[in-house]
Image (cartoon, rainbow, N blue to C red):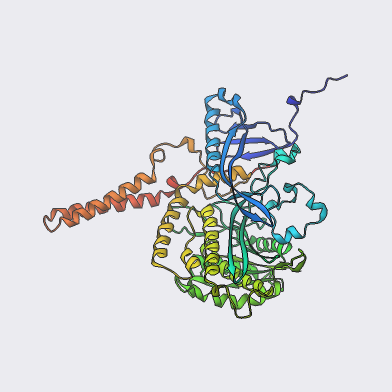
Amino acid sequence: MMEKADPAQKLYMRMRFWEFPDQYVIEPTDGSAGSCLAISLVDGSMNLIGSYLLVITERECVGSYMGHPIFKVSSLKVFPCDHSLKNSPLEQKKMETEFSGLLGVAERTPGLYFSYDVNITLSAQRLHNLGDESKLLPLWRQADPRFLWNNYMLEVLIDNKLDQYLLPVIQGTFQNFQAAIGRDIVDVTLIARRCTRRTGTRMWRRGADSDGYVAKFVESEQIMQLNGHTASFVQVRGSIPLLWEQVVDLTYKPKFELVRLEEAPRVVERHFLDLRKKYGNVVAVDLVNKHGGEGRLCEKFASAMQHIASDDVRYLHFDFHRICGHIHFERLSMLYDQIEDFLVKNRYLLLNEKGEKVEEQIGVVRTNCIDCLDRTNVTQSMIGRKMLEFQLRRIGVFDAEESISSHPNFDENFKFLWANHGDDISIQYSGTPALKGDFVRYGKRTAQGILKDGWNALARYYLNNFCDGTKQDAIDLVQGHYIVSVSRDMANTSQKGGLEAIASFRLALSLVMAGFFLTIMSLKQVRYDLRHLFFSALWASISVAIAAFVRANGRIFCNRPRLHKPRG
């Protein structure tokens, strides 16, 4: 009789294969929690990579969703699970340091929320429509995988049937306020659920993939509760569903690059087919410029939409910058006039005092600009305001002519609700609060808001070029995702030498600023000594030369080795 094999010696039956610029990584996916095997492409050496535990160490209660407490993650911490690696070879320790460094970035992931009692990956309508059997399932099995931030990290726990440890977490935002309308108290909640299918940072993840999943896809749900009634309205935003990108190259606005144009109709069709299955009818509101680089994307998007336009799917272009400029956002009423019939027809969810469904939302507005942040948030807040007024009239709280602006305290709270919503989403994508936030907060553009937008735009430029590459790698690592871009340098960064070994944007920026400072100082002395005119020209020339060098060698400063697509 054969002896029973030692479980520790059991062969892995399922594995995932990863390609990196300098190594292959083989990851067991059969629930064994075994270490990954790394194979160097430099010398063929093989080393085991340890497992890590990402733990929520602090939380805070931020409100309730459908009567259940909602918690925000205040602190995450990474713990290594294999201390035997302390005695590993130097090369393996170096590899572990790189991986733990990326996980250190993941520790600072903003906007994570969870509940022990209710599935916050589902909208109120989808929760209400769950069957009795589905409601008895563990929360992770009820969850919408699109919005399950820790989906990839839960795999080993799922394989080991550890349901009690499987806590669904979303990334997004949760905002709430209460305000009086006469004698009534209205409770308004706004939730953002960020899709994980093509998640990433502002410049490093654009457009769609070949399956139609888009970057920056967010489901925003506005919930109103009053006198036992519950009303919900869902909107979505997402990048233009074409294969396109912006390669970071130190320019303020990198060129838009369309990829594999012949696939555009199929990608758009897949994207909207998925939206139709999940939300019903769709009106796509495209806010990008009609001319310039954005105009080319707009033209291709509109052309692809002609092939799928129907009674169920509608495309509408609204040139936000041309019509509204930088201050006349009240002109969004022109857009509302064009979609009002869709909003009235496709309704919203309304539950009466008994929890019975009175109205159901059967369609969704899909809004996009280029970043799906600033213009999009202003537009969505306008639509959310109109729908909340519809709901309050429906339950008899507002009369036919009454509006949110008729109640100053309610109006102020609503503006701040959507402004904070936009800021949180923007920080996750771009690293800064949303632009145009003063209009959402105060209903008008302010000098302070315009100055703040200028500062945030500069901060975005810096973060996009010099920080987001590492952040994108960390996101790809914890999500089990990948990035494919043949235009980016795939060279092994550990082999850099010469200029690339010492190149530093901070150093270059310091030299440029010092050069311009000396230029100004020399110009001030010209009236006393004409020789300073020569020095002014010299310092200015040096500054311009350094700036031109940085621009020409943007790849040295910006690019990072990227993760490749996992196989298997």
> Front-most of 124 and 68?
68
> Front-most of 142 and 556?
142
Question: Residue 340 at what x, y percent from top left?
Answer: 63, 76
Quarter the C terminus occupies: top right
> Front-most of 75 and 274?
75
Name the residue: 59% across, 42% down.
477
Image label count: 0
Quarter the N terminus occupies: top right
Question: Residue 102 at what x, y percent from top left?
Answer: 54, 40
Q: Compared to 541, does 31 lie above or below? A: above
Using the rendered view, name the quadrant where residue 55 is placed: top right
Name the residue: 66% across, 60% down.
267
Q: Compared to 443, does 461 lie above or below? A: above
Q: Compared to 5, does 75 lie above or below? A: below
Q: Is residue 419 at all visible to an observer of this figure?
A: yes
Residue 272 appears left or right of 436: right
Question: Residue 564 at what x, y percent from top left?
Answer: 60, 44
Question: Residue 452 at what x, y percent from top left?
Answer: 41, 60
Quick one: which residue is furthest to the front in this view?
Answer: 183
Using the rendered view, name the quadrant where residue 500 is placed: top left
Residue 506 appears left or right of 397: left
> Front-most of 14 and 6?
6
Quick one: which residue is furthest to the left in this view?
Answer: 528
Q: Compared to 181, does 478 lie above or below? A: above
